[in-house]
Amino acid sequence: MPSNLLQTKLLIPPTRPIWVPRPHLIDQLNAGLDRILILISAPAGYGKSTLLSEWAHQVPMPVAWLSLEKGDNVASRFWAYFASALQTIPSLNALHIGEELKDLENASPSFFPEDAFTRLVSEIARITDPLILVLDDFHLITDPTINEGLVFVLEHLPSLPGGMHLVISGRMDPPWPMARMRARAEITELRLRDLRFTSEEATAFLNQTMGLKLSAGEVSQLDARTEGWVAGLQMAALSMQKRDDIPKFLERFSGSHRYILEYLIEEVLNQQPPRVMDFLLKTSILDRLTAPLCDAVMNGQDSQELLTYLEQSNLFVIPLDDERNWYRYHHLFADLLFIRLKNTQPDQVTHLHRRACRWYEAQGMLPEALDHALSSGDRQLVAQIVSANVLVLVENDEVLPTLQKIDSVPPEEMVALPWLRIARAWVLGTGQVQKSQQILDAVEMDMENMPDSVERQRLKGHIAALRTYIFSIQGDKVNTIAYAGLANELLPPDEISVRAMNLTMWGDVMSADGHDPSAMPILEQALALALQAEKPHVAMIAAGALASAHLGAGRLREVNRVCQDALEIAEDYQIHYHHQLSATAGIYSMLARVLAEWWEIENAVQSARKGLMLSERWGQVDTDLTGLDYLGRALAFGNDWAQARQVFQRAESASQKISPFFWQMNTIFALDSLLDTEAPAPGEIVEQIRRVQESGAHYPAPLKARLLLRDNQPGEALVVLEQVLSELRGQPSLDIARIHALRALAFQAQGDEKQSLAALRQALELAEPENRVATFVREGVAMEKLLRLALSKSIAPVFVQKLLTAFESRRKPKPEPSLVTKTLVEPLSEREFEVLRLLNSKLSVPEIAQELTVAPSTVRTHVRVVYNKLGVHGRQEAIQKAKDLGLI
Amino acid sequence: MNDSKKYDEPAVYQIRLKGILDPSWSDWFDNFSITTQEDETLLVGPVSDQAALHGILTKINDLGLAITAITQVEGARDDQK
């Protein structure tokens, strides 16, 4: 396997062994470190990347590097890579930059998430050691929200020294307020006139690097014609290397008015042996080169040798990693080669793309395979790739930008190739349900005239499975089951992964509101099919559903086993593909749930965060929400409501966008978790109850009983609990132990010790084998008291002792981060108080500025100071903290 | 507005470049016609809207060609008159 392709984006390109040193430019860059921003702006071929990589290898501070590509011009991807690049610097791992950026990744494109950016800025502002972030090929980033975000970050970063320096390099100036930045002297620029080779550099380059023996006159002739353009000089030198009649070449070259590059590339190529020329032209279709891929495209075996030759001859190949597994052509050179290929061998282009597509497909690198399929113009090939890999494509987070390209396929062709639309519908099904449904309706209409065939049945099966998926997201149990059955009938046996997926949703919805034994064989079959098809993505989803069904039955150890097995599969995948399986998200969340029940709070929080990170990258909203809810619960178990509250708020705004079902589930979870904390504030409870009512949710029995107990109505609570107990009729359920525990509390509140202990005994008997510590500890002081009583009567003494220890450890003050103090170390000034009070309103920063009749930048400074004094990173957090401290 | 040219509709543009470009580049530049005189090149062709125009300009920039002038030579037909 080739080394991880995506990681090459984050590597500082290796320096060239022989190159012209450019000390005056390095000096300029070093001098530029007294500003926040360094901009390198010049057309292709002036040595921008070469200069930066040379500098990056010698500058005495850490450098994070990101080589941008076309596909990165999407906010979510851009900020994900932005975070990954910063995280390559070890000392930044402790910062929450990745998390702050998650909000940006999920922000809707039309709305500027100022809060999230403010938090990002304060995170970056915590960087005190100087570091450099290079964004290379930034001209590819034209998306307005990304640019707006970066400008915001730059304008709000604290002034130097120390902290982050941003280096932007590209062929065009970024669409930023450059005049303002120049006026404030925030920016150092290196432009075309700086990057041109001076005559000394041209001489050194031609006579030393390229080994020519040119006279001063000849050099100045070349320099005049190329105007110091590095790529031009390089090509001219390559054209002359094997020539005896250099003066003649120079004469013709200097006299010609032809476009230099076009002129030179012909000269360069004509100098090459035919097999090198053939290689150059044919591999120009590739964005990146590696020997096995080139062999596949060329139908040859000597690519490694040729790549090495190209690098050694300075023929515009740039190694992307130190091992020299991957290369790319200089962009300009690749463009020209490709134009020439298209002009001379137009019929080859499709073949070459096809071969590249097949190679990538065989490597399991589907995004690249699909890119080449689309570039080949062979729509049948696109359809084949898509239909054979539809689920994997959908579940592969890196393929989304490519799948979005399907939108650029002309509508007529979309009609002719329903698979493209099906793939699109699958993609949309994870977030934009309505659009997905519209596509399905349209495909179904067009299919009416389609002759009966396996193909038709396959399509219909996919459509039914997709509808199953959509209904299951909407929590529509009846329709989910109906369509799952239909899809199961329609899908041909070879559609193993879609069938597995369909069965998963089927079994999942059956066990959604309580344990249903008939769901188990369906889910087991789903998992077996997915494993048989060797589709780890689907296997993760099936395992998640199976684990969830076990959870519903209260079999926590089984949940753990299923999750651990799944993680082993995921690990194999990761070793093989150097890529973390996003679908593992659900497994980590499920594991977090079990760990929380076992009162391994820190592990639970960690596992939930891991799951969240993956699900956010994946873009699966339902998995995302489960992850957030389980994270919130684990945090609440750990008594950290401030954080849990934030998590639930994030979950709530996300869930409202999906369906009422998710929204309701979420508000219930939040309220229940609030009651899990040690001393929930009454006002907070009222607030969470209001949210539950707003979402229209019905209270599940345990929560209802908890609220009644809180209101001193143990009799009512018992009615609710007995009712649900009788409905369960002895079926295994996650809730039973909890219900008995709550009954024990209700009897205790009524002063009925005998009944109370009897109920407690039942709860303990059910809970002990599955180690369900949380069932008791979450109920707080009353339960602790009851357990002490049980211990004195030797009821389940071993387990009870363990529970009491958990109570103890919960009370122990945690080594809290120093920022969470009950009073402010440094008091707020009067002005800062005013700002703080206005932050607790709907006013934006400019509006606050207006209110206080000061400049917005002044307000931002105050805000930063307020955040620092409060030890928070964002507006919501600041308001909450201020309320906690009684400041507002 | 007296401006008879419209900017959100197809129009013909002329782009003047420094240096001489071979006519075989035409399909690279959305089928603009390529003519050369002395030491400069004229690209003339229809663009469907401003976004398409910027696409062409980007390609020119990517190839390191120097632009000396851009003009709209013929606006879209104004049917409202």
Image: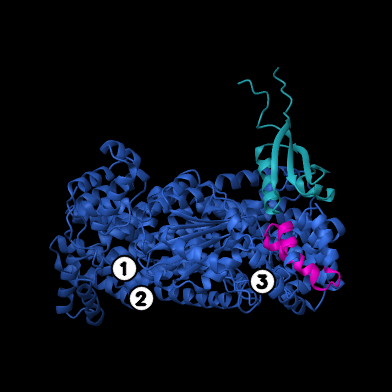
Chain colours: A blue, B cyan
Could you tell me which chain the residue with mark 3 belongs to? A
Q: What residue sits right under mark 3 in the picture?
A: A204
Whether residues under marks 1 and 2 lie with C-beta atoms below 8 angstroms apart, the answer is: yes
Residue A770: assigned label? 2
Q: Earlier in the sequence, mark 1 or mark 2?
A: 1
Q: What residue sits right under mark 1 in the picture?
A: A737
Q: State which mark lies toward you, 1 or 2.
A: 2
Type of amino acid under label 3: Ala
Type of amino acid under label 1: Ala
Nearest the viewer among A61 and A296 is A61
Say if residue B43 shows up in the picture: yes
Decide whether residue A754 is among the magenta residues. no
SS at mark 3?
Answer: helix
Q: Is residue A442 shown left or right of residue A727?
A: right
Q: State which mark lies toward you, 3 or 2.
A: 3
- Measured from the top left, where is residue A153 in percent x and y? 42, 53
Q: In the image, what residue occupies the spot 27% across and 63% down? A: A640
Q: Which residues are magenta?
A: A219-246
Q: In the image, what residue occupies the spot 24% across and 57% down? A: A870
Q: In the image, what residue occupies the spot 76% across and 58% down? A: A261
